[in-house]
Amino acid sequence: MPLISVIIPVHNRANLVNKAVASVLSQTLADFELIIVDDGSTDDIAGAISKFPDSRIRLLVHDANRGASAARNSGIIAARGHYCAFLDSDDYWLPGKLERQIAFMRKDGTAYPISCTHYHLSTDYHPQGEIRKQPCALTFHHMLYGCTAGPGSTLIVERRFLHDIGLYNADLPRLEDWDLLLRAARRTPIHILREPLSIVHFVDSKISYNIIRKCCQHIRSQFSSVGLTLGQRAILASTIENELAAAAYRNQRFGLAVLHFLKSLLLMPRRDGSYFVRVATAIWRDVMRSRPLTSRSQRGLDREGSP
């Protein structure tokens, strides 16, 4: 049996998945199987990966799109390795990622059942190559502030531990990573290898505000009744309001976004200054992206109206 089962869920990314696959096959630790789960794609995923004639690759196919959580769960159920390692189809690993992280999880006679790493984050709102850093270990208290560990491409976890805490919640189209790590952190801290070993691309897709609200309701009902202190309840509620503010903003419901943002501040007014910098930077970049298009449109109207 392989030591590690690497799981890549993919949906309609035949043009991107090859980079992820290549980064796995070039790892210095070779004792793995690679399970690619085609989640009902309409493009040619099988053809895209056919250029890698490697017996360690297994392709699972969903007849219809069931979502990233269901795809990861199919990979976990089919996995044979002692560990499961996850990689999103538009991300990739740096050389040595698997070897370093497994050594970290087994160092000094310890046996961490779950770990993540630092990572390079690439989005429209962050400088290319920004390193997202975490504490040495994420406790349940840390996780109440939200999911910033990039587990879609940094997480390695013992397969048995995954089955113990329950797999990904396939009913959550968003916040499924947060839900999983909250359940994990109730059992044990999530140890962090403080090296950036993954490149994570985040595309801020405009998912329905109502869908995010339902996911937040699940998180609230699932974890508000697990013996939280008043302070922890406030942290969780503030994080949820922050998620709702972001969802409303993405859907251009700006008044609702401001309302959720203010609620978040009222629940947890003491914030690190970088939080406000990130919010202001995101809004400013959106404004600057929209200005050239507006200017060009106006110039076109001016030309059409001129004699």
Image (tube, helix red, strand yellow):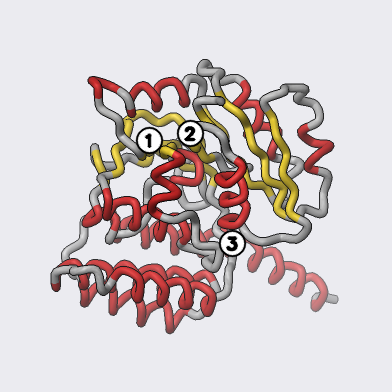
Q: Could you tell me the amino acid type at mark 2?
A: Ser
Labels 1 and 2 touching (C-beta < 8 A):
yes
Label 1 – label 3 distance at C-alpha:
24 Å
What whole-number distance in Å separates the C-alpha atoms at marks 1 and 2?
8 Å
Q: Is disc 1 surrounded by few (<14), some (14 to 19) or many (20+) residues within 10 Å?
A: many
Query: Does 171 appear above or below 29?
Result: below
Seen at 40% across and 60% down, the residue is 179
Against 25, residue 36 (above or below) is below
The image quadrant where one finds the C terminus is bottom right
Of all residues, the one furthest to the top in this rendering is: 28
Nearest to the observer: residue 245 or residue 195: 195
Which circle marks residue 198 in the picture? Answer: 2
- Disc 1 target residue: 117
Kind of residue at badge 3: Ser
Snapshot quadrant of residue 80: top right
Q: Residue at x 23, y 67 (%)?
A: 235
- The image shows residue 126, relative to residue 205, as above or below, that is above
Quadrant housing the N terminus: top right
Does the rendering let one see residue 48? yes
Determine the image quadrant of residue 270.
bottom left
Give coordinates of residue 166: x percent, y percent: 44, 56
Q: Which numbered disc flags the more N-terminal residue, 1 or 3?
A: 1
- Residue 40 on image: x %, y %: 75, 55
Visible in this render: residue 273? no
Q: Are marks 1 and 3 in contact (CB under 8 Å)?
A: no
**Crowd tier of the residue under label 2, counting other residues whose Cα lies within 10 Å: few below 14, some 14–19, many 20 or above:** many
Mark drawn on residue 205:
3
Identity, as a three-letter code, of the amino acid under mark 1: Thr
